[in-house]
Image: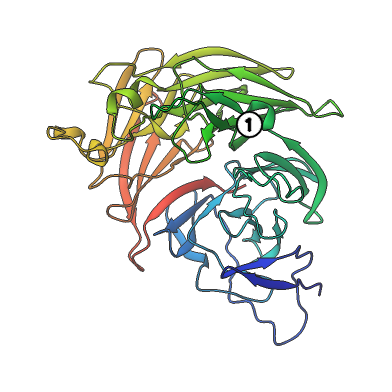
Amino acid sequence: MTTSSTTRTGGVLLLTVLVSIHCDTSDDISPFSSVSGARFAVVRTDFVSTSIAVLDDEGEILDPAVLSSGVVSPGLTTALSGDVVLASAQNGDSGVLNVIDRQGVDVVTWYDLTVGEVRGQLRVANGDFSTNPHDVAIVADERAWVSRYAVNLDEQDADDQANDIVEINPTTLRLSGRRVSLDPFNRVVEDTNGGSQGVMVYARPSRLVLVSDTLVVGLDLLSFGFDAAAPGEVALMDLRTPELSLTGFGLPETSRNCGNVQAVPGADDLVMVACIGFAQPFNDVAQRRASSGVYVLRITDGAAELVSAWEPGTDDDLPLAVTNLVPLSSTRFVGVAPGLLAFGGEDMGEKAFDEALVVDISTEQLISLFVAGGVYVIGQGAYDPASGLLLVPNGSDRSIRRYEMTGSDELEADDPVVFDDGPLPPTNLYLVP
C-alpha cells in the first residue's frame, strides 16, 4: 500500500497524493459498505459537519451517510470538512463519486460506491496556501481539470498560485503539472464603496462544463474582499490546441457573479449560465435584481454565442435572482428565488422565504414548486433526463422534494423523502454516473 505523509499547519490536516488505497492486511477493515443502484448523491451539511447520502432512481434513500465527517478509515487520509461539494458533472467511472473538500483542505476524493472503498485522494495545493477548489471536469480517461477559486496576493509565492485551472490525472491521482492561469480576466473596476481608486477584480473560476472539445469555465469576477464585481463573462478553453489558450465570451454588461455554468439536457452544444447578481451594499435588492439573469449559450469550435436570456431586470414581481440552477431543457430551468428576509426590509410578504420555481424562458412563465420555511435553505437540485425525475433539497425540513416530468412536460409532485437520522440538512444533489 502506498501511504501519504501528513503535516499539520494551522490546525488543518494537509496531505500529499494518495495513489493506492487498498490494503490487504486484516487490520484494515473499511467502515464503508458497498451500494448498488445509486442514481443520486446528496451532500448534507451544517457547514461544520458533512455526510454524503445516496438515493436510487426513484429518489428513495439507499444509504443516509456513505461518507461523513466522523469517519477516517484506511485509505481516507482526511475526514470530510464542513465545506464539501461534488463535481458538478459526475462523468467519470460508473458508481464513483468525485468529492471536493474546499477551503482550507483542497482535496479531491474518489469514492467507489460499487465496492465501498475510497480509491484515493489528491491535494490540489502546495504548501500552506489554500486554493479552494470548486469543480472537477473529466475530459479523458487520464485527463481532468480542477478550477481553483482562491487568489494569492503574495507574488513571491510562485508555487502556491490559484485563480486558475490545473490538470490532474484521474487514473494515477496525480497533478500533471499543467496549469492555465485565469489572470488575463482580472481587471480594475470602479470602487463601489465610493473611494477614489479602482478595485482589482479577479476571475475566480467556479463551475466547469465540457462541451465537445471545449471546456467552459464560469467566472464570478469578484474582488479579493468580495466587495466589487465586474460584468459577467465565461472563459472557453479549446482542448484541441496544444497551448490551451483561453478566450472570453462577455455576457450582458449588467450581469454579475456568473460562475454557475450547467450543461443543458438533450442539447450537446448548449450551456446555461446563472448570474446571481451583486449589490454593494449587500442588502440593495434592486441592484442585485438588475444584475442577475440566466443565459443560454451555444458552444461551437471553441466559441460561444448567446441563444436566449431571462432577466428579472427592474420588475419587482420577478425573483431578485435565481440561484441553484437546474436546466430542464433549452428553454426551461428550475431555480431558487432567495427569500427577501435575508436582505432586510419591512414589507416582504410572500417573498420572505426561499421559493423553488420553474421558469420558461420562451414564455416568461413562472411556476412555483414550493416555498421553504426559511432563507438559504433550498439547495442545488438535480434532474435525471432518463427518468424525468427532478429532486430539490429543502433544508428547512431536511427533505428531498420529488417531481416527475409527465408527457405534457409538466412536473408532477410526489411524496417528499425526509432524512430522520440526524440534524444534517440536505444542501446539494448530483447525478451518479
> In which quadrant of the rendered image does the N terminus lie?
bottom right
Horizontal and vertical percent position of residue 250: 58, 17
Residue furthest bottom as drawn: 27
Q: Quadrant of residue 164?
A: top right
Horizontal and vertical percent position of residue 190: 47, 22
Q: Residue at x 16, y 33 (%)?
A: 348
Left or right: 400 as drawn, with respect to 50: left
Q: Residue at x 28, y 34 (%)?
A: 283
* Closer to the camera in the image, 245 or 65: 245
- Give above or below for 259 relative to 18: above
Q: Residue at x 59, y 74 (%)?
A: 72
Q: Quadrant of residue 409?
A: top left
Q: Residues within 10 Å of mark 1 (few under 14, many from 20)?
A: many
The answer to whether residue 70 is seen in the rendering is: yes
| Three-letter amino acid code of the residue under disc 1 | Val
Horizontal and vertical percent position of residue 387: 49, 38
Disc 1, SS: strand
Residue furthest front as drawn: 196
Q: Residue at x 35, y 20 (%)?
A: 290
Horizontal and vertical percent position of residue 375: 28, 44
Q: Quadrant of residue 421?
A: bottom left
Instruction: Name the residue tied to disc 1.
Output: 217
The answer to whether residue 58 is seen in the rendering is: no
Left or right: 47 as drawn, with respect to 353: right
